[in-house]
Amino acid sequence: MTIQQIKNTLTELFKSQFKTPPTNTQPLPRSGSDRIYFRLSSNEHSVIGAYNEDLKENEAFFSFTKTFKKLNINVPSLLEISTDRKHYLISDLGNETLFHTIQNNNVTTTGKSTLCYLKKSLEKLIDIQLEGAKNIDFTKCYPREAFDRQAIHWDLNYFKYEFLKLASISFDEQKLEDDFNTLANYLLSVNSNYFMFRDFQSRNIMIIENEPWFIDYQGGRKGPLQYDLASLLFSPKTALNNSKKEILLDFYTNKLGEKMVLNKDEFIQQYYGFVLIRILQALGAYGFRGLYEKKSNFRRSIPQAIQNLNYLLNNKQLPIHLPEIERIIHTLQQSKWAKIIEIPSDKLTLRVSSFSYKKGIPDDPSDNGGGFAFDCRGLPNPGRLEEYKAYSGLDENVQTYLEKYDEVIKFQQNIRQLVEISLKEYIKRGFNHLCVNFGCTGGQHRSVYNAEKFATWAANNFPVNVVITHNEMNNWKRDE
């Protein structure tokens, strides 16, 4: 179905609901799902229109929404559903998410801290989990009715195939499967007779008049209490330090203890098992969305997730021994994926890199996209000569060899003329990031030489923050 057809159907639903057509139909940014959203509005009304091909997921959302509204839980109202059950209208909850509040220096315009909103959200979560368990029609859950062994292995395999494989992290297949089975057995021993929100994180919590409202719960199912708690507190988007995580864990368990008999020590021990699987599942999502689909906001969440895994391991918070997973965590901590990428917002960051075409063009860690990738493989290759094989484009003998050729000098000059157009315009418009990549066969000689020469020229001629990365040269040290 085309975007125009979707808009037309949503417009008809709006007219059916309000007896007047919308005066404005604005597409909303896509996130991690395949659903398509629009904001439809007139002078008196504003709603969110949604389109989703997945009928079973839609039916879960419709059913859960009706139940939550009856329980007076803050979720959007379901206004209209099309006859094909793929298009629907819900009430407009605005644009202020808890994630935006966290980004805004941890204080909202009303002066309330995000810790206050997190506590309110956790209190409401308890109602969702306990009251939802008594009233939700779990036969509507999709794709699984419960967080069972199959669902657990889906999450773990998501980590294995969409993160470890895409990030080229080595692992022993059988040993990892043994750990997966050990972890699944442990998690399945925990009481799971509650409603599990499934994706309880700051982007799915809206703030309206200082109260949290909840969206995107259609993946909910019967499950344990600890999973949703781990989802929120250990999400990179929540941006909590370890002390605040402990404060909120204590707050949640105290509030939960007011509503049910609770062995707090046992609950917390089990909780860290769910922290582990939630982080592994999240890394699978970051791998698929960030490394495969090249969505930079997901890519930038990887280092924090690795830090969270390292915290679990170093503080002996894992309730069971998982030797291969523990080895992988150690490997990740030493890998390039653990490096936090900081992009200063006050001036343009020019990220220059050399790479090997055997490994592919490096990811852009910004939200800008675009940039340049230059193929140096048409230039003379010192790597074919025995006397240069032990050297790189950082070494004077390789540089002297390359600069004997007019085409090498011309290649660099042409690149500077081309990129200069973007540099001037990006600086003028206040952009904060531009990637310029140089690739060759092995990522050792020609690409390194050109990246260095270009970076030096740019730093000497423009007010930019230059960051240079040689992706295949981790064992080489630059002459300071």
Image (spheres, rainbow, N blue to C red):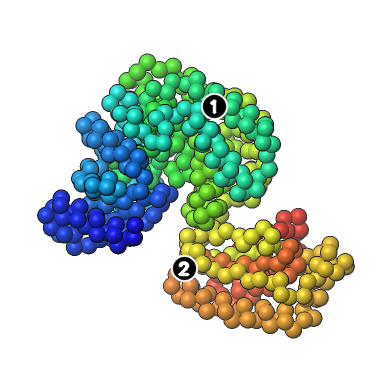
Label 2 secondary element = loop
Seen as rendered, the residue at the extreme left is 19
Horizontal and vertical percent position of residue 420: 56, 78
Q: Relative to 256, does residue 109 appear above or below in the rendering?
A: below
Horizontal and vertical percent position of residue 220: 37, 34
Query: Is residue 99 shown left or right of residue 402?
Result: left
Tag 1: amino acid: Ala
To which residue does mark 1 refer?
184
To which residue does mark 2 refer?
431
At a point 30% along the width and 39% down the height, the residue shown is 59
Nearer to the camera, 436 or 289: 289
Tag 2: amino acid: Phe
Q: Quadrant of the N terminus?
A: bottom left
Q: Is residue 242 visible?
A: no
Nearer to the camera, 8 or 353: 8
Horizontal and vertical percent position of residue 70: 21, 32
Would you say the residues marked 2 and 1 are in contact, meaning their CB atoms lie under 8 Å apart? no
At a point 59% along the width and 81% down the height, the residue shown is 417
Horizontal and vertical percent position of residue 453: 68, 73
Q: Quadrant of residue 254?
A: top left
